[in-house]
Amino acid sequence: MKATPLLGWYRALAVATGVALLVFCGFMVAKYGFDTAEDLTTYVAMLHGYLYIGYFVVTFLLGQKLKWPLGRMVFTLAAGCIPFASFFAERRVAAEAAAKLPAGGAARQAAGV
């Protein structure tokens, strides 16, 4: 199987989506717990939504390339909506892709990971 730039995009979007979701959760606490940051909460929610759309598309394409079963695909897609789950899914997917994609495995070995 040939190496794909989808893995790099997936890793970046998984981290960005996870961070945006955690920031969004913090703003939700501020909005509903302390009645502050109502306008900012809207913008952070939109940022997370746009990042999640990119995460969804890239994850779906990567899952097709790696021939994931439906359950694995659904869990990985849902990881962008569950706090902290995208970080765990990213590590797991990166390890699997490193084993299946030759350039991914070589890059991880060269980095000492």
Image (cartoon, helix red, strand yellow):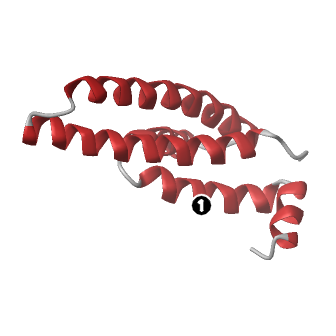
**Count of labels in the image:** 1
Q: Is residue 43 above or below residue 34?
A: above
- Residue 113, image x, y percentages: 74, 74
The residue lying toward the viewer, choosing from 70 and 56, is: 56
Determine the residue positioned at 75% across, 39% down. Answer: 6
Is 65 above or below relative to 18? Answer: above
* Residue 33 location, quadrant: top left
- Residue beneath the point at 53% across and 54% down: 89
Question: The residue tagged with tag 1: helix, strand or loop?
Answer: helix
The residue that disc 1 covers is: 91
Q: Position of residue 75 (x, y in %)?
A: 46, 45
Q: Three-letter amino acid code at disc 1?
A: Arg
Q: Quadrant of residue 4?
A: top right
Picture coordinates of residue 22, whole percent (x, y): 36, 47
**Residue 80 vertical placement versus 87 (above, below):** above
Task: Answer left or right for 102 relative to 20.
Answer: right
Question: Looking at this rendering, what residue extends furthest in the bottom direction?
Answer: 112
Can residue 82 be seen by looking at this rendering?
no
Q: Which residue is painted at 46% across and 46% down in the image?
A: 18
Q: What residue is shown at x 49% (from left), y 40% (from top)?
A: 17
In the image, is 67 to the left or to the right of 43? right
Q: Position of residue 63 (x, y in %)?
A: 66, 39
